[in-house]
Amino acid sequence: MKTVFITGCSTGFGRETALYFLEKGWSVVATMRDPAASTSPPSEQLRVLPLDVTRTESIAAAVAEAGEIDVLVNNAGIGWLNAIEGTPMAVVHGIFDANLFGTIATMQAVLPGMRKRGSGAIVNVSSSSTYKPLPLLSVYRASKAAVTSLTESAALELAPFNIRARVVVPGMAPSTSFASNAQEQIARGGWFPQAYQDFADQTMAAMQAAGSGDVTTARDVAEAVFRAATDPDCPMALPAGADAIAWARGG
């Protein structure tokens, strides 16, 4: 039985991806900062481990406890919605720590084992915001664009060891906590520049209108991640959800 190691599984894409791999008969290591927050149904094929992707010692401990890992899914990350002028540098560093540096560190932790076995797959979750510029997402988009670039280059250097690297690109997903978390962070920190308020109101109204159409579900992402992990003919970047597919095609 193959084992998948997934980060950020407490809710949303990560949780659904863990459940999907379980349905497919895989052994699943679902990681999150607080395992007590897990709402996944109990299963003999499921292990829930603590993991903070911003701490290398936490990554090392989780990977060691997981044992042999066939597939790594880097899903954990932080959403952010604010003007760049109103984003403190401490927040910028925190976003890149979680979204990019944590992805790199987790890859570094699992790659020695994959390379020695001569097989493995890494699936990194990016964002459809990388397909075209969107306002108020500048820092978040930059971090996710870096994840895509990282994966594309890593795929070339890992191919000689029979290790595949792919990126899944989800579209807008109202069912996730991205927007609500971002808005709570802004309100709590009081960082949003008042001069941008009218523009932000218009932007949010447009986003909400777009979200009333065909948007990405957590199941779309789980299916895309599974394909990226198991299909050797999967494209380098795989859009997940109707809106992401449309954006990828220039729509």
Image: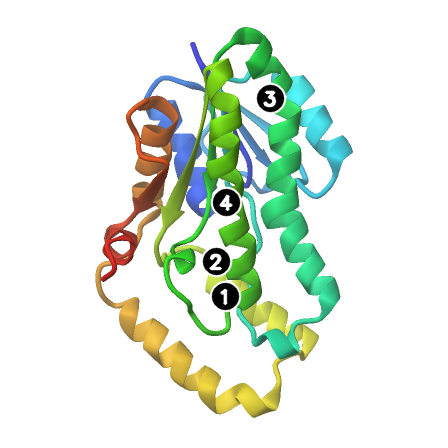
Q: Nearer the viewer, mark 3 or mark 1?
A: 3
Q: Earlier in the sequence, mark 2 or mark 4?
A: 4
> Looking at this view, is 165 or 218 the one in front?
165
Residues 23 and 39: in front is 23
Residue under pointer 2: 177
- Disc 4: CA contacts within 10 A as few (<14), some (14-19) or many (>=20): few
**C-alpha separation, residue under disc 3 versus residue under disc 1:** 34 Å
The amino acid pointed to by label 2 is Ser
What residue would you read off at disc 4?
149
Classify 10 Å Cα crowding around label 3: few (below 14), some (14-19), many (20 and above): some
The answer for how far apart the CA atoms under marks 2 and 3 are is: 30 Å
Tell me: 135 left or right of 189. Answer: left
Q: Mark 2 and mark 3 in contact? Answer it, CB < 8 Å.
A: no
Decide which of tag 2 and tag 3 comes sooner along the chain. Answer: 3
Upstream in sequence: badge 4 or badge 3: 3
Quickly name the residue at label 1.
180
Image disc number at residue 111 = 3
**Residue 122: x and y, percent?**
48, 28
Tell me the crowding category of disc 2: few under 14, some 14 to 19, or many 20 or more residues within 10 angstroms, Cα based. few
Farthest residue, direction right: 57
SS type, badge 3: helix
| Disc 4 from disc 3: Cα separation | 18 Å
* Side of 249 where 222 appears, left or right: right
Is label 1 in contact with label 2 (beta carbons under 8 Å)? yes
At label 3, which amino acid type do we have? Leu
Q: Which comes before the other along the chain, label 1 or label 4?
A: 4
